[in-house]
Image: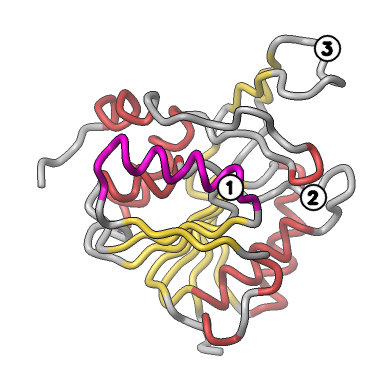
Amino acid sequence: MKKLKLKELESRLQQVDTFESPKLLLEQYPTRPHIAACMLYTIHNTFDDIENKTIADLGCGCGMLSIGSAMLGAGLCVGFDIDADALEIFNSNIEDFELTNINMVQCDVCSLSDSMLETFDTVIMNPPFGTKHNKGMDMIFLKTALQMAKTAVYSLHKTSTRQHIQKKADEWEVKMEVIAELRYDLPASYKFHKKKSILLTSFAPLTKCIHLISP
C-alpha cells in the first residue's frame, strides 16, 4: 500500500460526505477533514497504531475517522453509532471509496456488552462533548473505549475538560497524555448558531490513553 502523505490524506477525506440533517440531541458535529487527517496521521506515523491493526471508531457518524484509518492500512476498522441515518451515509462513503476493510454496527455505545472487552487493538473517536442534554457522555465514551482497547485509545476532547480527564485517568489507572492540540472550525449546523462558523482555539486536544493495568 502506498504511504500517504498528510496533505494527500486530507485531500481524500475532503471527499467524504457528512451529515445532511445533524441531530442536536446526538451532538452531531462532523469531524473536519483537516482535524481527522492530523489526528490519524499522528496515530499512524508516531505511534504505529493503525496499519494492520483492528480499529474501533466509537460514535463514528458518517465514517470520517474510520475511512481515514482504512486509507492508512488498518487491518479492519469497525464504526459504532446509534444513528441509522448517519450509518447510511457512512455506507455510501464506503461504497464510493471502494473500501473493503471497514464494517459498521448500529448500537448505543453506552450499552456495549462485556463481550467487547479488549476486542480491538486501537480505539479512535471524536465523542460527544457532554454538553446540552448529554452531560458526562464524553467520559462514558472514554471509559467504554478503554474497556474495548487492547493497546491505546485516541480521543478528541475540549481543553476545558483536561483536568477532569486526568482525574478520571488516575482513577481508572491508565496513563493519559495530550499529544496534540488542534484548532477546530465549527460550522453553523443548528438553528441556534448565529454565525457561519466559530474558530475554537482552545478546542480538541488529541488525548492518548494507554492501559497500565489490565482489566
Magenta span has 81?
no
Note whether residue 106 is visible: yes
Of labels 3 and 2, earlier in sequence is 2
Tally of numbered tags:
3
Determine which residue is flagged by label 1. Answer: 126
Q: Amino acid at mark 3?
A: Lys
Determine crowd level at label 1: few under 14, some 14-19, many 20+ residues with C-alpha closer than 10 A: many
Please tell me which residue is depicted at 60% across the width and 27% down the height of the picture: 184
Quadrant assignment, res 19: top right
> Could you tell me how far apart the alpha carbons at marks 3 and 1 are, in whole angstroms?
24 Å
**Point 50% across, 77% down: residue:** 211
Which colour assignment does the render follow?
secondary structure
| Residue in the picture at 31% in, 35% down | 96
Q: Is residue 209 above or below residue 163?
A: below
Give the magenta part as a residue range. Answer: 83-99
Residue placed under numbered mark 2 in the picture? 130
From the viewer's perspective, tell me whether residue 126 is left or right of residue 167.
Answer: left
Q: Quarter-wise, where is residue 55 in the image?
A: bottom left
* Residue type, numbered disc 2: Gly
Using the image as rendered, state which of residue 214 and residue 114 is in the foreground.
Answer: 114
| Residue 96 colored in magenta in the image | yes
Q: Quadrant of the C terminus?
A: bottom right
SS for callout 1: loop
**Dot 2 lies on which element?**
loop
196 up-or-down from 154: above or below: above
Viewer-nearest residue: 161 or 97: 97
Q: Is residue 148 left or right of residue 46?
A: right
- The numbered disc on residue 194 is 3
Question: Three-letter amino acid code at disc 1?
Answer: Asn
Can residue 45 be seen here? The reply is no
